Amino acid sequence: MPRTSLLQLALAPLLLAAGLAHAGPPAAYPDIDEATATYRLAVVELEAQGELPQFPQCTSPDVLCMDPPPTWFRARVLDTLHGPSLPPRIHGATTSHYGPMPMASPQYGKPRLMLLRSDGDRHVMMRYANGFLAEDRAGFPHLVLVDAQPIWWLPCGATDLKEPIHDAGLARASRIPMEHYQQRFANEHGTAYVLRGRHAYPRHAIPMAKLAAWLARRQDLPANLQCRPQATR
């Protein structure tokens, strides 16, 4: 076999992986078989979003769909905490009653922890299964707890890994303006915050390094990771 053919053969898996990592958005909401799906817990940054076609059943005059159409997203993968490693960039899809996810937050920055159901090539973020991360003074990321309830899309017991926020850098990065707190959190989640001046400061966060080590030690994790499974869309 010619040398050039051997080289092409050797590079083929790398070229294929690169092509999959940079493939375009899905044409429709992915139908991933739950029986063969794997779940990935990853730290990502959103780069783009767009609208997908509405579910066919929603076009029926006898069906009332309260959600807008599903959305696709492109994300840069910073780390895979659990499950098969993801490529550097992925396209995925999700649903929401509120439309596209916030692309960034002045309080928490862009990185977020996200639970994905995958068939290897296609990825679906479980509905609302993501949370903003904030960095401490040393640059280590933490999942900021915006309320006092256990996080349903993490394994049972994961919320017990929370630590009080004492680091000044983490406190600054996770605080929210008082008006935002009053609008969204004061009534139901007030006990999760400390009020100082013009900001509300979350009391607790989960260090990502601590969560990753805890996940690696666990041998009894459910396949879908979730403590309280939600609807698949």
Image: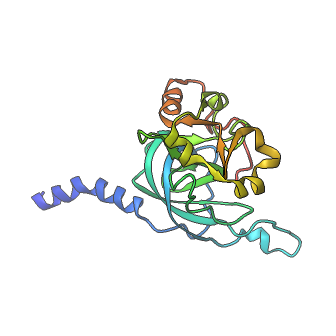
From this view, report whether residue 35 is shown above or below residue 9: above
Q: Does residue 16 appear anywhere in the picture?
A: yes
Percent position (x, y) of residue 111? Answer: 50, 52
Which residue corresponds to the image point at 41% horizontal and 52% vertical from the top-left? 87
User: Tag count in the figure?
Assistant: 0
Q: Quadrant of the C terminus?
A: bottom right
Which sits in the foreground, 58 or 179? 179
The quarter of the displayed image where residue 89 is located: bottom left
The residue positioned farthest toward the front in the image shown? 197
The quarter of the displayed image where residue 71 is located: bottom right
Percent position (x, y) of residue 9? Answer: 22, 56
64 lies left or right of 31:
right
Q: Does residue 114 appear anywhere in the picture?
A: no
78 lies left or right of 215:
left
The residue positioned farthest toward the right in the image shown? 62
Which residue corresponds to the image point at 56% horizontal and 70% vertical from the top-left? 27
Q: Quadrant of the N terminus?
A: bottom left
Which residue corresponds to the image point at 86% horizontal and 69% vertical from the top-left? 63
Percent position (x, y) of residue 31? Answer: 63, 58
Which sits in the foreground, 170 or 206? 170
Which sits in the foreground, 18 or 67? 67
Percent position (x, y) of residue 3? Answer: 10, 58
Which residue corresponds to the image point at 62% horizontal and 31% vertical from the top-left? 158
**How did the renderer colour the structure?**
rainbow
